[in-house]
Image (spheres, helix red, strand yellow):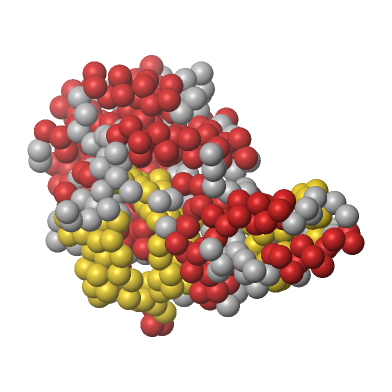
Amino acid sequence: MPGAIEAHGLVREFKGGIRAVDGVDLTVAPGEIYGFLGPNGAGKTTMVRILATLLRPTRGRALVAGHDVVAEAAAVRRSIGLALQEAALDRYMTGRELLRLQGVLHGLSGAAGRTRAAELLDRVGLAEAADRQVRTYSGGMRRRLDLAMALVHAPIVLFLDEPTTGLDPISRATIWDEVRRLNTDAGTTVFLTTQYLEEADQLAARVGIIDGGRLVAEGTPRELKARVGDPTLTIVVGDPAEAPAAAALLAAFGPPVPARSGAAGAVAARLRAGAAAVADVVRALDEAGIAVAGLDLKEPSLDDVFIAATGRRLREDDADEPGAEPLAVDAPARP
Amino acid sequence: MSALALRQTAALAHRSVTVTLRQPDVWFPGIFFPLVLMAIFSASFGEAPGRIAGFPQVNGFLDFALAGAVLQGAISPATGAAGAFANDLEGGFLDRLVASPASRVAVLGGRLAGAAAIAVAQTAVFVAVALVFGARAEGGAEGLLALVTTAALVTVAVGGLGIVLALRTGSAEAVQGTFPLYFALIFFSSAFFPRETMHGWFRAVADANPISHLVEGMRAGIIGGAEGGSAGTALAIAAGLAALGLAGSALALRGRLRRGS
């Protein structure tokens, strides 16, 4: 099956020979949510602009919904929905007017446009604010309207350029829910750029990491993390005196690492067999008669993946990074 | 132009008018200042016709001043449209339009048609006010129709030129900065006084200024042939300039989309 999005050797040079996109090859399968993860200036937006027909590639070729983005730009435009960074809206228009206008641009009849606008306003929770001018909207409301506008014509492929940058957690969750629902219910292919690790982790079936215009790693979040290393299991024993025994036992399952928690009686190791080994460790501890007070399994994060791929952290300021929290313990359920 | 492209143009023109009407600070000066100028000149030079040698035989100074007000008024919606276009460009709304199946004709045409509609409405206000205060439309309904049409075409011309500037500079400030330039052009023409009463270098400038021929033709639509201007000439000049504005903005948009930024 051809990809919903295919890029072959895509290059975009700007004045002064700066290559914002530098030879990107990627394929996004129909119905997939693809997360394009990278820091500011990595080339994410340039990539979206090329795929959305707003920018011509300097070299290479891209197909979206089966159409060439240069030679068949009109067909691409009919198939895609686009929500660009910094919700581009007319402040003096109402939400409903903007949706109706977008409907006309996409050739919806008057009646169909009206119905669709009402439906989408309802869906993104803007029914009450529908007839207010956008200048009275909050940042989150603008983003939701922006998303609704991208959906007016039920696009096959949806491009979201940093859809939740600068949003509060509730607005972010609303956008995430809507994107998931679109993908599940309508089978919409989603190409999402983000600089939030958690966003890529939560939403994307596959993640491509872009840095300096190049795709430096690609895979499912699980694969990417697995490539970096095994999960770290930290055991806190009830009696600190038993810590050496627990450490010796744990060493059988993988190389010991310094315990991050710092609690007395905490020992840690990287599980060679992955999360699946947790149950075996617990059983072994139990057989040895060592009482366990706490247990924590940490998967490597996408941040670790990014560091492994580029040698740098994704964001210098992790303060507003919602992905700073480690992944939840994801031990296998055994009967 | 396909039926869909027409609908898109109409929808974008409607947007442009609605959004302008919601910002009184945008449309109000375009109506207010020409009216003020018309009132001041008519009061100051009310006795000029018939007393000053070379002044065309008109019913009153108001009849004479109306065309200047209409021309001056036509500039506001044009620079307003170009400024709004620049804002669309800066704010990313233009990207949204361009990435949709909207025809390029609709993107430009909608914006300029909206501005032209505002120019028509303004001109109707100026004419109505002048008639209420005693002006006589010697040129008849035909003359007034020519006046209104010329005003709309001037708006398209100046708006198109402004959009070229917007696409070249990407800045609304640059576009708004041209506004005084048009006023200078209008003041150094026969917009408010007949060329016959001017002298020296000013006369030479007004003679050479194409705006003089444009405004005298617009005036002929109101006062008839008293000054020697021709409504047809004005229409032709305005139509030519409008065609230039349209072609220029279409080329500039195409260039911008090819460059991608």
Residue B41: horizontal and vertical position, in percent?
Answer: 47, 36
Q: In this view, does A231 lie to the left or right of A84?
A: right
Residue placed furthest toward the bottom:
A17
Relative to B65, say whether A4 is above or below.
Answer: below
Residue at image x 62%, y 66%? A253
The foreground one among B88 and B239 is B88
Residue at image x 57%, y 30%? A136
The foreground one among B253 and A102 is A102
**What is the quadrant of the C terminus of chain B in the image?**
bottom left
Residue B11: horizontal and vertical position, in percent?
Answer: 27, 31
**What is the quadrant of the N terminus of chain B in the image?**
top left
Q: Quadrant of residue A303?
A: bottom right
Task: Give the number of callouts.
Answer: 0
Residue placed furthest toward the left:
B2
Residue at image x 51%, y 18%? A128
- Work out whether residue A198 can be spotted: yes
The foreground one among A175 and A99 is A175
Residue B163: horizontal and vertical position, in percent?
Answer: 34, 53
- Work out whether residue B196 can be spotted: no
Residue at image x 46%, y 75%? A212
Q: In this view, does B106 lie to the left or right of A138?
A: left
Q: In which quarter of the image is residue B62?
A: top left
Relative to A292, say whether B27 is above or below.
Answer: above
The foreground one among A127 and B149 is A127
Residue A194: horizontal and vertical position, in percent?
Answer: 49, 55
Relative to B34, say whether B177 is above or below.
Answer: below
Q: In this view, does A60 lie to the left or right of A301?
A: left
